[in-house]
Every structure is written in C-alpha cells, then in structure tokens.
Amino acid sequence: MRRLTKALGYSWKQAKKLLGKASPLRRAEFVQQLGELLQKGQQDDGPLVVFCDEAHVHLDTDLGWGWAPRGQSLYVNSNSPPLARKLTCFGFYALGQTEPVRLWTTHWANAEMTHQMLGALRGSYPGRRLLLVWTTCATTTLTRFATAHNNWESSWCICLPTART
C-alpha cells in the first residue's frame, strides 16, 4: 500500500493546523500602529506598554501523521474539548520594567476573573498610565472595568487582530 500511495504522488508527513480566516492587511495596519505607540511609550511621560494574552491549556487535536500529495501540506481540523477541561493563564509583559512578567491562572476565563486580573495589574503600577496590547480582548469587559475603577481612566487598550480576522 505504501509503494502504491507513493507512486500516486503522495508522501508521509505531519499534519498542520490551518488558520483559514487570517487578514494580512489588518495585521500590517496593527504593526504600524503599534510602532507609533511603542515610540510614545519610550518617552518619559509616555504610557507603560504592557503586552497581554491568555493561554487556554486544554486537549486538542493530535496533529499526527498521514498521507498528502507531494509538495502539499496535510491539515487536520482542530476541535476544542469542553471549557471545564482547560486551565487559563493570563500573561503580561511590561516593556522596560525590572520585573516585566506577571502571570495569573484560573480555571474559568470570564468577566469576573478578567476584572480581578486587571485590578492586580493596575495595583502593580498605580501611578502610571498603561497601554494594554491584547489579543482577543473583550472591549465590553474592559469598558465595565474602567468605569468601575477610577484609577484606570488614564489607561487604554488596543486589540491585536486575531488569527480569524
């Protein structure tokens, strides 16, 4: 069977996930905007630039190996298990700080957990404007948080376009 499959022009390879809806144009616009904001963050009175992201650790599709036409990648569909079977880790990198990395973990990433995490972040840098650069941030959650916390009003968030936009 192997010889026949190879004779038909297939080769044995590891599968890759396919991000089908990425937008290179939106990403390029974001990179240009980010460059301008980073320059502002380097000024003495500029905001502290904090890169934010969440990682959801859970079971997913095993990429495995399979047959694909020679010269073409092998893709498998990704699936996600129930939310109860994951751990969420919020990570922050504060550009130019002596202790730049901050991590928070939770079993459930919802508005309440996001508020707690943002409150802890705000408490870490109480006298400084913050610029959060975040992937997939929920602007409604951030707006509610900013409204509830007066010391957040001089800060703002920009969202990195996701792989799907």
Image (cartoon, rainbow, N blue to C red):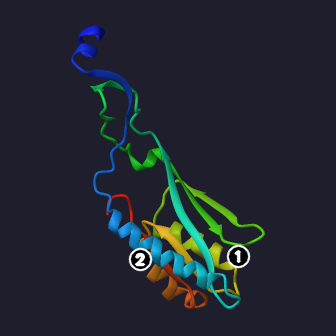
- The residue at the point 52 percent across, 62 percent down is 53
**Mark 2 vs mark 1, CA separation in Å:** 22 Å
Q: Residue 112 versus residue 20: which sits nearer the camera?
A: 20
- Please provide percent x and percent y for residue 38: 58, 78
Q: At label 1, which amino acid type do we have?
A: Ser
Give the residue type at disc 2: Thr
Q: Answer above or below: position of 74 versus 122.
A: above
Looking at the rendered structure, the secondary structure element under dot 2 is: helix
Taking the spot 29% from the left edge, 27% from the top edge, the residue there is: 70
In the rendered image, residue 144, in percent from the top left (x then y), is placed at 45, 82
Q: Which mark is residue 115?
A: none
| For marks 2 and 1 on the same chain, the one whose residue lies earlier in the sequence | 1
Q: Which mark is drawn over residue 139?
A: 2
Q: Residue furthest left?
A: 8
SS class, disc 1: helix
The disc placed on residue 124 is 1
The answer to the question of whether label 2 and label 1 lie on touching residues, with beta carbons closer than 8 A, is: no
